[in-house]
Amino acid sequence: MKTRVVVNGEMYERDVEPRMLMSDFIRHELGLTGTNVGCEHGVCGSCTVVLDGEPVRSCTMLAVQADGRRITTVEGLSNDGEMHGLQRAFTACHGLQCGFCTPGFLMTLLPVYNEGKRLESEEIREVISGNLCRCTGYQQIVESVQMALDEAADLAESGEGPDRPSDDADVS
């Protein structure tokens, strides 16, 4: 089936098998390997991408379901080689160890970051509750998120708005 999708601001059109998972499409058809596949059941969150502004598990969705839609992967976070605010915060607060789960956390958090509002620790834990990390005790992840959300809120309050991935290409 012919599938057209905008990924990280760039239009792609591919013939894909109707049963191909979106995670496989992203990794194998587009060569974007930042989207990791862990459990292949939608439980661990490693494969999370943002689809039309909402985080989704790409291992539980078919590529053809993304036809005509916009996807942001972890590769789409940086802007001209500059790390996104979430990436900077995870680095500064040591919110990652092996890094396997980090793309899923970042993509889960992107819509919250883009809202530019502050969250309490328990609210952050609720947002990330669908993402599993086997290396950390989550405290550094929560601290990373707190730092990033505070930065985004400060930017929103100043009228600048948080940094957002580019999404220029037209899907139609």
Image: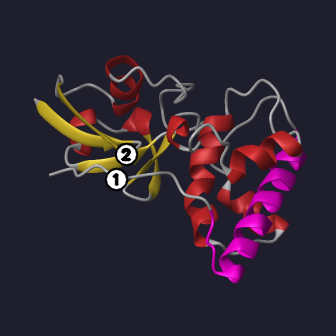
The amino acid marked with disc number 1 is Asp
- Element under label 2? loop
Query: In the rendered view, how is the structure colored?
Result: secondary structure
Q: Is residue 37 visible?
A: yes
132 in relation to 117, above or below: above
Residue 138 image position (x, y, % from top left): 84, 45
Q: Is residue 118 visible?
A: no
Name the residue located 69 percent from the left edge and 38 percent from the top edge. Answer: 132
Q: Is residue 158 magenta?
A: yes
Q: Mark 1 = which residue?
A: 168
Quadrant for the N terminus in the image: top left
Mark 1 near mark 2, Cβ–Cβ under 8 Å?
yes
> Residue 9 shows which numbered tag?
2
Q: To which quarter of the image does residue 159 belong?
A: bottom right
Name the residue located 89 percent from the left edge and 48 percent from the top edge. Answer: 139
Decide which of tag 1 and tag 2 comes sooner along the chain: 2
> Residue 125 shows which numbered tag?
none
- Element under label 1? loop
Q: To which quarter of the image does residue 114 belong?
A: bottom right
Instruction: Answer few, some or many: residues within 10 Å of disc 2's Cα (few below 14, many 20 plus, some between 14 and 19).
Output: some
Q: To which quarter of the image does residue 19 belong?
A: top left
The amino acid marked with disc number 2 is Gly
**In front of the other: 161 or 19:** 161
Q: Is residue 115 shown left or right of residue 5?
A: right
Residue 14 image position (x, y, % from top left): 18, 27
Outermost residue, left side: 1
Query: What distance separates the C-alpha of mark 1 from that of mark 2?
Result: 5 Å
Magenta stretch: give its range.
Answer: 137-162
Name the residue located 70 percent from the left edge and 61 percent from the top edge. Answer: 126
Instruction: Answer few, some or many: residues within 10 Å of disc 1's Cα (few below 14, many 20 plus, some between 14 and 19).
Output: few
